Amino acid sequence: MHGVYRAIARPAVEPTQGVNVLRSVAVVLASYVAMVVVVMVGTAVAAAALLPNGLASMRTPTSGTVPTNYLSANLVVSLMGAVLAGWLVARFAASNVNAHAVALGILLLFMGLVSARMTPGGTGQPTWYPWALPLIGLAGIALGVALRSGQ
């Protein structure tokens, strides 16, 4: 009788390590995608509002310098996107929020460094700008996690 009770009380399917890993990967990737969407939309809005040719400026490389107000707006939008990503990863991580935040930070840092290396010279951006974006992103993730965690 005891064995029957244990069989009934135990769930039919116990969560496996693989399912938890897939959930963790999905949480990190979804948080990153949310950040990318915020940055893309914010960049488009900033371009339309602050660049001389509006959205058309995004299609053709500029020969001059990019206006400082546009770069500043882009840095703020990037920070906002990273804060959202940090908040989301902290909200939806099943456990060990810090490990999820670190994974998100590594992904952001990797993609940011790849992007910075691929940014050609003569884009009108200061040379420090593409390298600053991943650092701002890391700070934003930490802030988002802290906001969600109440710290």
Image (cartoon, grey):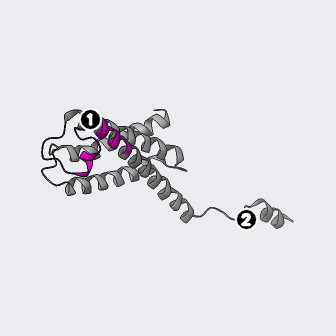
Label located before the other in sequence (2 or 1): 2
- Looking at the rendered structure, which numbered label has been put on residue 82? none
Which of discs 2 and 1 lies nearer the camera? The answer is 1
- At x 40%, y 53%, the residue is 103
- For residue 119, above or below residue 142: below
- Of residues 69 and 53, the one nearer the viewer is 53
The percent coordinates of residue 101 (x first, y second) are: 42, 48
- Looking at the rendered structure, which numbered label has been put on residue 50? 1
In the image, is residue 57 part of the stretch drawn in magenta?
yes
- Of residues 149 and 141, the one nearer the viewer is 141
Q: Write down the region rendered in magenta.
A: 41-66
Looking at the rendering, which quadrant does residue 73 occupy?
top left
Amino acid tagged 1: Leu
- At x 52%, y 43%, the residue is 91
The percent coordinates of residue 99 (x first, y second) are: 44, 51
Give the residue at the far right of this rendering. Answer: 1
The percent coordinates of residue 102 (x first, y second) are: 39, 50
Mark 1: which secondary structure?
A: helix
Left or right: 16 with respect to 1? left
Mark 2: which secondary structure?
A: loop
- Looking at the rendered structure, which numbered label has been put on residue 12? 2
Left or right: 54 with respect to 141? left
- Quarter of the rendering occupied by the C terminus: top left
- For residue 135, above or below residue 114: above
Amino acid tagged 2: Ala
Alpha carbon separation for disc pair 2 and 1: 58 Å
- Quarter of the rendering occupied by the N terminus: bottom right
